[in-house]
Image: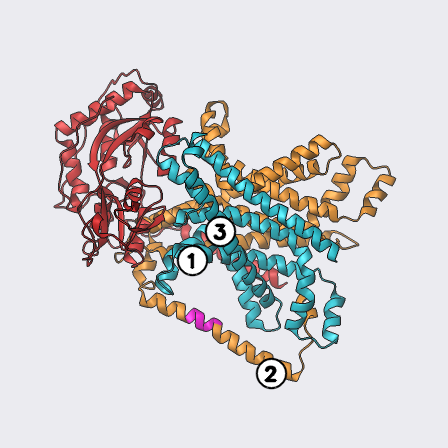
Amino acid sequence: MSSSVLYDAPGPKARVRNRIYTVLGSLAVLGLIAFTLYRMNVKGQLEPEVWNIFNNAGVRTSIRDGVVTTLKVFAVAGVLSLVLGLLLAVARLSEHKTVRWAATGFIELFRAIPLLITIYALWFLFLTYKNGLGVVGDNTAFWALVIGLTVYNGCVQAEVIRAGVNAVPRGQVEAAYALGLRKSQVMTMLLLPQAVRSMLPTMISQLVVTLKDTSLGYIITYSELLFAARTMASNIIVNGENPITAVVIVVGAIYVALCLALAGLATWIERRGRRAKTGIAVAAATEPSVVDGTD
Amino acid sequence: MNVLLDHLAEFREGFIGTVLLTLASGLLAMVLGVIIAGFRVSPVPPLRFFGTAWVTLFRNTPLTLLFLVAWFVVPVIFMPGLSPWAKALMALGFYTSAFVCEAVRSGISTVPLGQAEAARSIGMTFFQTLRLIILPQATRTVLPPLSSIFIALTKNSAIAGAFSVTELFGVQKLLSDQGFAIAWIFLWVALGYLVITFTISGLFRLLERRMGVAR
Amino acid sequence: MKLRKSAAAAATVAVLALAATACGGDSGNAGDKPAGGAGGKDQPKLPTYTVASGVKLDSATLKRAQKAGKIVIGAKNDQPYLGFQDTDGKRSGFDIEIAKMVAADLGFKPSQIEFKTIDSNVRETTISKGEVDLYVGTYTINDERKKQVGFAGPYFMAGADLLVRGDEKGITGPESVKGKTVCSIKGSTPLQEIKKAKYGAKTVELSKYSECVQQLLNNEVDAVTTDDAILKGYAAQRPGKLKVVGKPFTEEPYGVGMNKDDKALREAVSKAIEAHEKNGDYKKAYDATLGLSKSAYTAPPALERY
């Protein structure tokens, strides 16, 4: 366990104390859960009718469609943002001043503007020129959301990757140049693979953010999971009330499950990558720069 | 152009609202985040479990959903009568605290092992080690991610606008409902955000430089 | 190792959740009764409209719609008895009926109408960019909006009113809300009105009326304000629990929104509304939708042509 350096292996006294804390803590957590359930019951949130709405075909279809739409947007935006992130990171590390400045400006600008505004502005642009845009013109809301997410998350990913590149020991680069590798070779064969590998956890948590941020599609009335949930919560009436609590719990659980599955998938990929590599373990980046937070 | 001049009062109010909300929920997130990070590395299993559950829950839920919980679930299940501002503070603070916690935790793991061992060997308890030795040193590594977290928080506060809090993004809704061209309003709102976020990243860069010298 | 296990568990949960939502379920409406819209035996029936054929207009919007074989109409989906969509995706309400009668006169069968849910804050954008051909959704005609979109109508005269709990005695009209908390949608006209010093209400501003209504039921706010037509729908959805005060304090003429420069279409829509008001379809549609909320029928306002 990584945290064990912070305290000694407990002696008999400490073990007793820890056990007491454990019992008290468990009781507190259980008490909180029990209290919540009790209050839910008092307020009629546990009535079978309230939960029965999820047996309805219409409700199921809209949840399923919501999940599918969310995943569709995420899949495209996630891949594109990683590509953009790589490109921007390379551009920002470029030796040409103009390229470096352009990339820095782009990153700083789009990281600072709320994603909602970016998405809306893109949608507005796409609508204005929709006849000249081909595929994009047919599905403006989808592409506005995808491109908006790509631009914002691409900028964040670029910063993460850059921090990873900077963390690669200087000597390696010097050695590579001494061997006669070109600049592009050093970047693609040496720096980026190591940067990506050491920064993978951070990149994944940014992907989780991307997944959650698909919910910002509501601003351009793009109907993904959260939008569908809010419509359901307001249009269904059970026992004279909107089943907001039930819908929030179910949809929240779906989001958490999706995000955890994504994180799990990434950890699995990472492990495979590690196993394939022989020899020295990758040095962790010294500065775990730029982490998550959404827009 | 006219939109800004004619509605300067609304824009100013929104700007101040965003700044205040960001500051307050940032503070709450910092305090909670450090405490939860302490939980996650503590020797007591239920505390660790609580910390993990907290982070998992708040980091993987869209913020809008948390706002819905603050507005429609908390008053029914726990306590009624919270002000809109308190609800926004809670949702934003809790959400951001999960990210702060993870940043602090990764900061803790960058402090050299020997430091913790030395602290223990001179008889410091877990809390003393954390408070006096580990956290002060972790601060430096935690600063860059914290800067990003606070920038994200600033922009996240826009969601509070849909829940009865006066803030910058809500100005857009207010004015577009009166029928003004939305493109211009967005331009001014975006500029407002740029001012705030650049201030934050500037401040953190300054802090980093200070801390860097101190070490 | 631990991480891997929990990740696997999470993946399982996700798959289960998907599987659970994917397979079947009961059909029909969720909830204990059909919310909004018409239905039942002794309730007034919705009229059907004769579809015109061979409509020729010098209108770019209409020509495009005719070429596509369908007309796209923007509407709301969360206002019972006005613009509502149930869990099966079926739309109902007075605004929807207006849309159908106008579409019929323009030569489109109900099956040729594609409804799109358009939120208030993107109405002007979607209309002016041609995302929707017409917009029918509690759209108040005002001068600022006229700079961006064209209006046909008004087809209905609504007014801001107050919705309160069934047992409320303190609030009898806008003059008695001093110190009370009133909920409405951010930026809406009734909200701006009730905020004025002469009423002195505290306000809560959310983004959906249904969320305001839920706040009212939770005792978190004392009243909800918006157009009476919308409020009556909510009151009818929960008889006894909620009531409308019945003292409108603004005038909100509802219009059909469309491209600003399409004068021919504007004229045609106005004509269609007028024709249906004259032949009784309008009243029938009202009785079968908004009328169910026990709000009295009022004659439609005079059309405004410009």
Which residue does the numbered mark 3 point to in the structure image? B20
- The answer to whether residue C222 is left or right of residue B90 is left
- Could one spot residue A269 in this view of the protein? no
Q: Chain B is drawn in which colour?
A: cyan
Residue B70 to residue C233: above or below: below
Residue C31 to residue C159: above or below: below
Discs 2 and 1 share one subunit: no
**Label 2 amino acid?**
Val
Residues under labels 2 and 3: Cα distance?
A: 46 Å
Report in which chain the residue with disc 2 lies. Answer: A
**Label 1 amino acid?**
Ala
Q: Which quarter of the figure has residue B212?
A: bottom right
Discs 2 and 3 share one subunit: no
Q: Chain A is drawn in which colour?
A: orange
Residue C201 is situated, as x and y percent measured from the top left of the image, at: 29, 51
Residue A189 to residue C51: above or below: below
**A97 in magenta:** no
Which residue does the numbered mark 1 point to in the structure image? B86
Report in which chain the residue with disc 1 lies. Answer: B
Residues under labels 2 and 1: Cα distance?
A: 40 Å
**A30 in magenta:** yes
Which residue does the numbered mark 2 point to in the structure image? A16
Residue C118 is situated, as x and y percent measured from the top left of the image, at: 36, 37
Determine crowd level at label 3: few under 14, some 14-19, many 20+ residues with C-alpha closer than 10 A.
some
Determine crowd level at label 1: few under 14, some 14-19, many 20+ residues with C-alpha closer than 10 A.
some
Magenta segment range? A29-34
Label 2 element class: helix
Q: In front here: A44 or C2?
A: A44
Q: Which quarter of the figure has residue A65?
A: top left
Q: Chain C is drawn in which colour?
A: red
Identify which residue is drawn at 59% across, 78% down: A18
Image quadrant for the C terminus of chain B? Answer: bottom right
